[in-house]
């Protein structure tokens, strides 16, 4: 017995020690992690820095030179600097190529149809990079080594931080940067020994309210702000202000203004400031193109108090450098700011600040003076709401901008209740690199929404006003009115000389159907069939789906569409039966073969599209499959229609759960591969 008990307790001990060694690793992990962090702290002189920017295309030589100078000055800061440029423009890709792996181009974010990047999408992308410090800066900002030392200093802080700085405006910059990106020369070729030489040659103005800003943050655990960043357009200062305001009020991070510790600047050039404003425009509409900027004022209304909150940067802690020492200062009281964080004592390695306080009269104080001039800058004053909600883009002005070389556009018609569906559809087309789509909006809400999302949208002013409620689905009165709006709009565009692929927003596109659809030639209208039977003819009565068809701008098609619109106007039904009855004859008297109809008066042929390549929502129960995407791909689908389901909510759920969904509703961004 005793032997047994010894054995047993011995065994138990073995188990216990085994168990505890099993438990150990996390602890060891922690310790090594700690030493790793300590090691990282020791390596602080060398944080990995990623600088993000959204350059203009390198087309104009002046812009190209300034941006090139800027990027070279960034790369000259440290070998640890990586540059990421947000753009889709070929000129940016070829510029980046010259720098090898140090500069990369990121096209997979959201842009407006005019090519302006979305700020919220840029920020989201920047969070996914793994460097120690992220910097977001204007593409023409020239950075000097004092920026790097400021970042190095900030990198030592024990708290997550957000650094903001305004860029000085300079009108004239008579210096060159050497090939190595490190040495500046005067115009006469003489090497510049001290940065002061550069700085003092300029009358420098800076103002955190108006000026272009630089944002930098360490990639710590804490987010910059708590609320979701609205879809701001990049290019105006307001989004920077928004970030600063939200970072301050969320109070996650230590926010400070380093404008006076760094001497970065950008060249002031009024003319080219409006680049994004004018892009793509060459016509009379350009002067009314201001919504790209004023989009922010639309946002102002949409985000209400959130956005109208006053900014008061005089409260912002300033980082100053005096006698080679960095110091945080509350400029409103001209004394050291206690920072208000629990970790404050260790912030900045507990520098002795009282002594600084005593030497208030030091030269540093002089440097403070301009700071006091920066008073509150309220955004309220500079935003003029409502102005930009005018219908800036008419159908006529959009068509030449949007159409492809075949003068073809893809038309979607949407009301507000379908806004998420619309966006998923748009994101899908963007992913397929299809850019010739245009959105006819049925109400003010969806128009505003579409503009904010950078879509080429116009307001169909003739649309009935009460068609955008939730239950506007097949079979309802509302649905009938909406569909009639669609055929009327198609006819209008055909008459303007453009071919139209009308696609409901609940049609998911697997691949671009346009080359296939345009191969049918003139006087043929290819349209989706609503036949769900797997065999038999697909052109039997009322099986023409008016939610996906391709109409050419030719005489026969226009004449036939005119008949459809006229019929629909006098019909109590939706436009779908009007389409069929007009083109294929009541009871299908104009049917030819199994998949066509020929309208005798106009000679227009309706070609019902192969149900395996353009399946409707009831065909083969495809939507019920576990893997809708692969099932459709196997069949060679071009598109699949999410119809034959009742109710907007059910339709939405079916599409989201099937994975044929490309839009993140909470952040208002297209789902990208990096997310
Ligand atoms: C720009 O305008 C000029 C003259 O007004 C015209 O010849 C040219 O085709 C236009 N270019 C584009 C891209 O619209
Ligand atoms: C721009 O808009 C204003 C008012 O919204 C209008 O009076 C003017 O004609 C427009 N200009 C052009 C060129 O479309
Ligand atoms: C901004 O802050 C300063 C100093 O704290 C204060 O005097 C001023 O009234 C503030 N302005 C606003 C609009 O809150
Ligand atoms: C444009 O038209 C040509 C000739 O009809 C056709 O081959 C091509 O596929 C069309 N492109 C698109 C995108 O439809
Ligand atoms: C499907 O087609 C077959 C053959 O044409 C026919 O016998 C059958 O009744 C059809 N089914 C439906 C549901 O229409
Ligand atoms: C279509 O069929 C219905 C019933 O089968 C009939 O009453 C109607 O007259 C037909 N219409 C035409 C134009 O043939
Ligand atoms: C339709 O085609 C027929 C035969 O090809 C022709 O006689 C008739 O004039 C055409 N009608 C129209 C309106 O083009």
Image (spheres, rainbow, N blue to C red):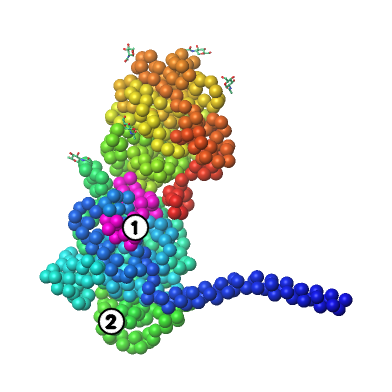
Q: Is residue 6 magenta?
A: no
Residue 111 in picture, x, y percent from top left: 35, 49
The image position of residue 8, as x and y in percent, is 80, 74
**Which of label 1 and label 2 is nearer to you?**
1
What count of labels does the image hold? 2
Residue plotted at (34% across, 22% down): 523
Say which residue label 1 marks.
104
Dividing the image into 4 quarters, which one contains the N terminus? bottom right
Q: Nearer the viewer, residue 17 or 69?
A: 17
Q: Position of residue 167 (x, y in %)?
A: 27, 66
Side (left or right) of 83 relative to 537: left
Picture layout, residue 461 above or below residue 565: below
First of labels 1, 2 by sequence position = 1
Give the residue number, with chain letter if any, for mark 2: 364
Q: Is residue 8 above or below residue 484?
A: below
Residue drawn at (21%, 43%) of the image: 282
Local crowd at mark 1 within 10 Å, few (<14), some, or many (≥20)?
A: some
The quarter of the picture where residue 140 lies is: bottom left
103 part of magenta stretch? yes
- Residue 595 visible (yes or no): yes
Residue at 25% across, 68% down: 181
Crowding near the residue tagged with mark 2, few <14, some 14–19, many ≥20 C-alpha atoms within 10 Å = some
Residue at x 45% of width, y 80% of height: 346
**Is 343 positioned to the left or the right of 285 in the image?**
right
Tell me the magenta residue range. 95-121
| Quadrant of the picture in which ligand 5 is shown | top right
Q: Secondary structure at mark 1?
A: strand
**Percent position of residue 37, x then y:** 48, 74
Can residue 484 be seen by looking at this rendering?
no
Helix, strand or loop status at disc 2: helix
The residue lying furthest to the right in this view is 1
Q: Nearer the viewer, residue 196 or 8?
A: 8
């Amino acid at each position: 017995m005793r032997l047994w008990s010894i054995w047993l307790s011995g065994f138990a001990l073995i188990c216990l020690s085994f168990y505890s060694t099993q438990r150990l690793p996390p602890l060891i992990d922690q310790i090594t992690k700690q030493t790793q962090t300590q090691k990282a702290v020791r390596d602080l002189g060398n944080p990995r820095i990623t600088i993000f920017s959204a350059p203009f295309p390198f087309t104009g030589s002046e812009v190209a030179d300034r941006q090139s100078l800027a990027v070279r000055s960034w790369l000259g800061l440290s070998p640890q600097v990586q540059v990421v440029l947000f753009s889709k423009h070929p000129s940016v890709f070829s510029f980046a190529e010259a720098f090898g792996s140090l500069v990369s181009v990121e096209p997979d974010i959201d842009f407006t149809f005019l090519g302006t990047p979305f700020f919220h999408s840029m920020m989201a992308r920047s969070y996914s990079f793994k460097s120690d410090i992220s910097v977001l800066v204007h593409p023409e900002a020239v950075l000097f080594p004092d920026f790097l030392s400021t970042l190095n200093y900030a990198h030592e802080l024990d708290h997550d931080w957000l650094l903001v700085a305004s860029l000085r405006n300079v009108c004239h910059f008579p210096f060159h940067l050497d090939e190595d990106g490190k040495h500046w020369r005067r115009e006469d070729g003489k090497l510049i020994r001290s940065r002061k030489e550069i700085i003092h040659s300029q009358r420098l103005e800076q103002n955190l309210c108006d000026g272009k800003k630089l944002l930098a943050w360490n990639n710590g655990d804490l987010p910059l702000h708590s609320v979701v960043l609205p879809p701001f357009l990049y290019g105006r200062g307001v989004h920077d202000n928004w970030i600063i305001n939200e970072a301050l009020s969320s109070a996650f991070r230590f926010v400070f203004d380093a404008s006076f510790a760094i001497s970065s600047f950008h060249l002031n050039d009024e003319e080219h400031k409006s680049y994004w404003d004018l892009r793509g425009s060459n016509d009379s509409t350009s002067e009314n193109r201001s919504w790209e900027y004023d989009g922010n004022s639309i946002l102002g209304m949409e985000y209400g108090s959130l956005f109208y909150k006053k900014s008061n940067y005089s409260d912002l802690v300033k980082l100053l450098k005096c006698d080679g020492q960095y110091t945080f200062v509350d400029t409103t009281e001209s004394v050291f700011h206690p920072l208000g964080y629990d970790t404050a004592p260790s912030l900045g390695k507990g520098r002795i600040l009282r002594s600084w306080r005593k030497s208030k009269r030091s030269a540093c104080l002089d440097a403070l003076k301009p700071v006091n001039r920066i008073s509150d800058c309220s955004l309220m004053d500079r935003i003029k709401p409502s102005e930009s909600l005018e219908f800036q883009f008419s159908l006529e002005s959009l068509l030449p901008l949007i159409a492809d070389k075949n003068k073809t556009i893809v038309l979607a018609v949407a009301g507000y209740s379908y806004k998420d569906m619309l966006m998923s559809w748009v994101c899908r087309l963007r992913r397929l690199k299809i850019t010739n789509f245009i959105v006819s909006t049925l109400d003010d809400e969806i128009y505003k929404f579409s503009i904010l999302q950078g879509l080429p949208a116009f307001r169909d002013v003739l649309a009935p006003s009460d068609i955008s409620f939730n239950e506007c689905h097949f079979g309802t009165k509302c649905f009938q009115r909406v569909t009639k709006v669609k055929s009327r709009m198609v006819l209008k565009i055909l008459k303007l000389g453009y071919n139209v692929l009308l696609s409901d927003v609940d049609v998911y596109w697997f691949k671009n159907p346009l080359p296939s659809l345009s191969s049918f030639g003139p006087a043929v209208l290819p349209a989706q069939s609503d036949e769900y039977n797997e065999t038999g003819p697909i052109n039997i009565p009322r099986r023409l789906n008016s939610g996906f068809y391709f109409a050419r701008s030719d005489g026969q098609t226009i004449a036939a569409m005119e008949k459809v619109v006229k019929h629909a106007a006098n019909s109590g039904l939706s436009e779908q039966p009007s389409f069929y009855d007009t083109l294929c004859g009541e009871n299908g008297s104009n049917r030819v073969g199994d998949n066509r109809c020929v309208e005798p008066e106009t000679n227009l042929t309706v070609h019902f599209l192969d149900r395996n390549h353009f399946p409707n929502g009831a065909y083969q129960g495809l939507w019920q499959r576990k893997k809708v995407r692969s099932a459709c791909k196997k069949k060679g689908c071009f598109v699949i229609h999410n119809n034959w389901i009742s109710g907007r909510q059910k339709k939405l759920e079916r599409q989201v759960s099937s994975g044929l969904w490309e839009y993140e509703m909470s952040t208002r961004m297209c789902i990208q591969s990096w997310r």
